[in-house]
Image: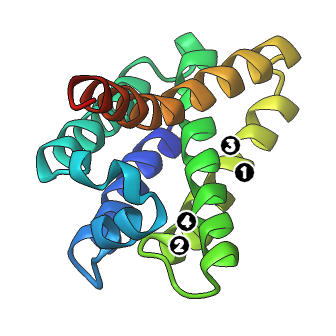
């Protein structure tokens, strides 16, 4: 099952390629979705947060099942991100860059990993909860950055 951690990295790369290169347009879509954060959605921000995700994937691959709750937090991040993309499609009623890889890769890989590691006994209920919370927190980091940057900017410009 260690292959799943490599698959998380490969899926993340494919997802980011869909968002930014082909067909791309993720930043434009995000600016439309959250106009008050638009000025802070920069290429630098995208590189930093996507780079951090790739580092998480590499760390999960390196530690594998020796720190299963941490490694599976990447599955939680991918699952959460995938569901956010699906939710954005429903809200916008059109394609959102990243949703294809989210539906075809992120969601099935994450669910498969959770089910497999849980059934094998390698992942406990506590591990599911811890990894789930960590993944949600990872997903919250860019949103929190945007909210904080926006609040600071507004306070300076009052």
- Residue 66: x %, y % from top left: 54, 11
| Farthest-out residue, left | 44
Q: CA distance from mark 1 to mark 2?
A: 18 Å
Q: Quadrant of the C terminus?
A: top left
Label 2, secondary structure: give it: helix
Q: How many C-alpha atoms fall within 10 Å of the one at disc 4: few (<14), some, or many (≥20)? A: many
Cβ atoms at labels 3 and 1 below 8 Å apart: yes
Position above or below: 61 against 50 = above
Label 3, secondary structure: give it: helix
Label 4, secondary structure: give it: helix
- Residue 96: x %, y % from top left: 48, 77
Q: CA distance from mark 2 to mark 3?
A: 20 Å
Residue 123 in view of the camera: no
Looking at the image, which residue is at 36% across and 29% down? 145
Label 1, secondary structure: give it: helix
On residue 102, which mark appears?
A: 4
- Residue 116: x %, y % from top left: 77, 41
Q: Left or right of 23: which side holds 138?
A: right
Camera-near label (4 vs 3) is 4
Sequence-first tag of 1 and 4 = 4
| Front-most of residues 50 and 32 | 32
Check disc 3 and report the residue beneath it.
113
On residue 99, which mark appears?
A: 2
Cβ atoms at labels 4 and 2 below 8 Å apart: yes
Check disc 1 and report the residue beneath it.
112
* Residue 69 image-quadrant placement: top right
Q: CA distance from mark 4 to mark 2?
A: 5 Å
Q: CA distance from mark 1 to mark 4?
A: 14 Å
Camera-near label (1 vs 4) is 4
Looking at the image, which residue is at 37% across and 28% down? 151
């Amino acid at each position: 099952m260690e292959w799943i951690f490599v698959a998380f990295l490969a899926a993340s790369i494919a997802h980011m390629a869909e968002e930014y290169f082909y067909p791309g347009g993720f930043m434009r879509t995000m600016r439309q979705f959250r106009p008050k954060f638009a000025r802070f959605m920069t290429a630098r921000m995208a590189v930093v947060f996507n780079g951090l995700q790739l580092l998480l994937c590499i760390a999960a691959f390196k530690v594998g099942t020796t720190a299963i709750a941490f490694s599976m937090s990447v599955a939680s991040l991918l699952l959460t991100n995938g569901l956010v993309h699906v939710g954005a499609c429903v809200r916008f009623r059109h394609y959102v860059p990243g949703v294809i890889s989210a539906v075809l890769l992120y969601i099935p890989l994450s669910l498969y990993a959770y089910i497999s590691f849980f059934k094998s006994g390698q992942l406990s209920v506590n591990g599911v909860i811890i990894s789930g919370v960590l993944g949600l927190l990872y997903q919250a980091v860019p949103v929190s950055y945007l909210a904080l940057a926006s609040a600071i900017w507004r306070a300076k410009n009052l």
